[in-house]
Amino acid sequence: TYMGKCRAMRLAADVPENRWDEFYLTACYLTNRTPTSTLPSGVTPYEAWFGEPPCLRHLREIGCRAFVLI
C-alpha cells in the first residue's frame, strides 16, 4: 500500500512524523513510474497512460543535499 511505502521511506530517511504527507506523494509518484505485473512486459502505468517511458533522471535519494540556484 502507499502508506506502507510511505512509512518505510520515512523511517529509512529518519525524518519526523510530520512529513508523512510528502512521503505519501513520493510513494504514489514512484509507484506510477515502476513496472507492474498487471501490465504486459514491464510497462509502467505512466507509460501505459502517456505512451512513452517516464524520465527518471530528476530523481534523487531522499535526504541528499540540495542547492537553491538564484
Image (tube, helix red, strand yellow):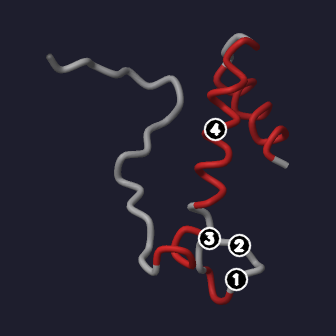
**Kind of residue sitting beneath label 4:** Leu
Q: Alpha-carbon distance for marks 3 and 1? A: 8 Å
Q: Alpha-carbon distance for marks 2 and 4? A: 18 Å
Comes first in the chain, label 1 or label 4: 4
Other residues around mark 3 within 10 Å, as few (<14) / some (14–19) / many (≥20)? some
Which residue has dot 2 on it? 36
Mark 3: secondary structure: helix
In this picture, residue 68 sits left or right of residue 64: left
Give residue 50's position: percent from left, percent from top. Answer: 47, 74
Tag 1–tag 4 contact (CB < 8 Å): no
**Kind of residue sitting beneath label 3:** Pro
Which residue has dot 3 on it? 45
Which residue has dot 4 on it? 25
Which residue has dot 1 on it? 39
Comes first in the chain, label 2 or label 4: 4
Other residues around mark 2 within 10 Å, as few (<14) / some (14–19) / many (≥20)? some
Q: Residue at x 51, y 23 (%)?
A: 63
**Kind of residue sitting beneath label 2:** Thr
Q: Alpha-carbon distance for marks 2 and 1? A: 6 Å
Mark 4: secondary structure: helix
Q: Quadrant of residue 64?
A: top left
Q: Residue at x 35, y 53 (%)?
A: 57
Give residue 20's position: percent from left, percent from top. Answer: 72, 23
Q: Alpha-carbon distance for marks 2 and 3? A: 8 Å
